[in-house]
Image: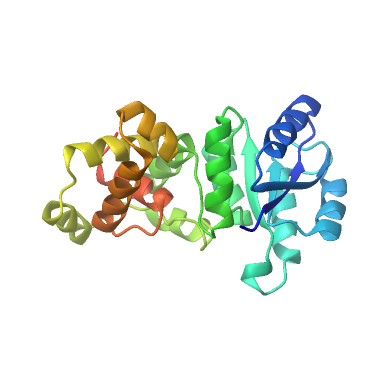
């Protein structure tokens, strides 16, 4: 199994040390380096070329969104070799969220995220999909419902396009309704829970959770958990 190579760019010492220490305890994660500001971070990425850069928005010398834009600009054309960016921030306002995605961020997490969910976000991002914190998904959804065309143009093409559910999608949900248990699992997915956490909350096995998740993805015609969560929110399946 290939390790997920992670670089951490965060100016708050305690936060940076805490995340680094936690990640280093996981065999599937390799922390290749850390930096306390954007300039050091760019140098770190150039020398280590990690799979994922965890970037704080509030860096002292340059906004994390601008840093994300630079990272994406300097990535070469090979998508498989490109450095993915996971934004980690306390800011949950819609302007920051949309700006981050427009800059090319692959995933967006709040700093109060649980470590299990951060690991899940890293795995999803490493797999080429976007992980959006449930609080962020709701913010983007609200913006999308107000100005869907603008949001669809603003969000980077690799992230989930969030706009209002159309009639055809409503018909699909009606034709393939989710079971009560699947709705319970879907609600926990929207809340950002990992399979292990879902299994613990619902008193079922992880294998059973995986089966439910697979059925949910099929019924919602979703490619991944994030897309399923966004579709659930925009269709009103969960609130």
The residue most toward the top is 14
- Expressed as whole percent of the image width and height from the top left, the position of residue 131 reads 51, 47
- Expressed as whole percent of the image width and height from the top left, the position of residue 57 reads 69, 39
Q: What residue is rendered at 32% in x and 36% in y?
A: 187
| Snapshot quadrant of residue 90 | top right
Camera sees residue 93 = no
Q: Quadrant of the C terminus?
A: top left
Q: What residue is rendered at 35% in x and 47% in y?
A: 210
Residue 136, compared with residue 214, is above or below; it is above
Front residue of 65 and 131:
131
Q: What residue is rendered at 52% in x and 56% in y?
A: 154
Camera sees residue 119 = yes
Residue 164, compared with residue 95, is above or below; it is below
Left or right: where 27 falls relative to 39? left
The residue most toward the left is 175
- Expressed as whole percent of the image width and height from the top left, the position of residue 83 reads 69, 59
Front residue of 105 and 25:
25
Residue 49, compared with residue 41, is above or below; it is below
Front residue of 222 and 97:
222
- Expressed as whole percent of the image width and height from the top left, the position of residue 132 reads 49, 44
The image shows a total of numbered marks equal to 0
Q: Which colour scheme is used?
A: rainbow
| Snapshot quadrant of residue 197 | top left
Q: What residue is rendered at 31% in x and 40% in y?
A: 186
Front residue of 62 and 189:
189
């Amino acid at each position: 199994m290939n390790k997920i190579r992670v670089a951490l760019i965060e100016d708050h010492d305690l936060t940076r040390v805490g995340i680094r220490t936690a990640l280093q305890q996981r065999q599937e994660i390799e922390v290749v380096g850390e930096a306390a500001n954007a300039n050091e971070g760019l140098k770190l990425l150039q020398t280590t070329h990690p799979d994922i850069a965890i970037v704080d928005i509030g860096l002292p010398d340059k906004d994390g969104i601008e840093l994300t834009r630079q990272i994406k600009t300097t990535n070469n054309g090979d998508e498989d070799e490109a450095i993915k960016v996971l934004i980690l921030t306390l800011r949950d306002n819609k302007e920051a969220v949309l700006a981050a995605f427009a800059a090319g961020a692959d995933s967006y997490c709040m700093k109060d995220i649980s470590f299990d969910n951060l690991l899940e976000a890293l795995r999803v991002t490493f797999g080429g999909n976007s992980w959006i914190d449930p609080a962020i998904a709701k913010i983007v959804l609200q913006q999308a419902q107000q100005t869907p065309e603008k949001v669809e143009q603003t969000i980077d093409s690799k992230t989930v396009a969030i706009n209002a559910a159309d009639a055809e999608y409503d018909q699909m949900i009606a034709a393939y309704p989710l079971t009560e248990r699947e709705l319970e699992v879907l609600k926990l997915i929207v809340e950002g829970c990992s399979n292990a956490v879902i299994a613990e909350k619902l008193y079922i096995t992880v294998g059973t959770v995986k089966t439910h998740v697979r059925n949910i993805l099929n019924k919602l015609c979703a490619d991944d958990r994030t897309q399923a969560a966004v579709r659930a929110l925009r269709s009103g399946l969960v609130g």
